[in-house]
Amino acid sequence: QVNLLQSGAALVKPGASVKLSCKASGYTFTDYYIHWVKQSHGKSLEWIGYINPNSGYTNYNEKFKSKATLTVDKSTNTAYMELSRLTSEDSATYYCTREYYGGYFDYWGQGVMVTVSS
Amino acid sequence: NTVMTQSPTSMFISVGDRVTMNCKASQNVGTNVDWYQQKTGQSPKLLIYGASNRYTGVPDRFTGSGSGTDFTLTISNMQAEDLAVYYCLQYNYKNTFGAGTKLELK
């Protein structure tokens, strides 16, 4: 069965970076794009961007272009998102999700909470 | 950027009610709209894709409709387990979520 397992919660200091992981299993990793979505506490969902695990091609929401960097490691079926120069505005839950062939997000990770605090 | 405006922000409903919520796109997105359900403390779950296609395993009381700029999600016979926040998403150009409609019990 398809599963996206995200890394554990992170507490990071302002100005630092954090790298979140999303390990895929139960399907061919390189066949589906992986997207990342931000959800600030009690708020709506924001699309950050996606990566094509096969080619490494990325596409970002303009708002997150200088904040997030998406990569993959095909040898471990893992997608990563690095968030840089963290501020309190980056405190949120981040989800990875799989896109089904140009349409919808059919599987989601459990989410990872990032807290930015000194 | 395509803005997705959801209404209402929240609804107080009773079990058995017929519930209708809306999503309006700031420009034509065709039928490139999905609906997701998010219960407290959980990841979002896909309900409807391509504006009107029910995803596998989704009860038939959930119905999506619309095209162009106006979209609707209807729950025909509200159940307690349907209490959640519902989000629309357009993927015609990049991806944009609506702000959500929260269903609460009267």
Image: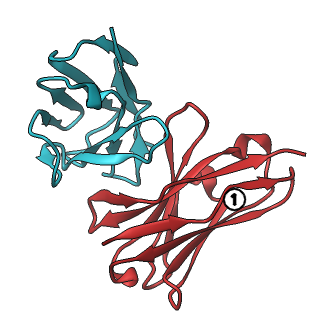
- A31 on left or right of A51: left
Letter of the chain shown cyan in the rendering:
B
SS type, badge 1: loop
Q: Position of residue A56 (x, y in %)?
A: 50, 81
Residue at the top extreme?
A: B106
Which is nearer the eye, A82 or B16? B16
Q: Tell me the quarter of the image containing the C terminus of chain B.
A: top left
A107 displayed left or right of A41? left
For the residue pair B16 and B71, the one nearer the viewer reads as: B16
Amino acid carrying mark 1 in the image: Ser
Relative horizontal placement of residue A31, taking residue B42 as reference (left or right)? left
**Is the N terminus of chain B in the top left, top right, bottom left or bottom right quadrant?**
top left
Position of residue A64 measured from the top left corner of the image (x, y, whole percent)? 62, 54
Question: Chain letter of disc 1?
Answer: A
Colour chain A appears in: red
Which residue lies under the disc numbered 1?
A66
The residue sitting at 24% across, 12% down in the picture is B14
At 40% across and 34% down in the image, what residue appears?
A: B98
Residue sticking out furthest to the front = B80
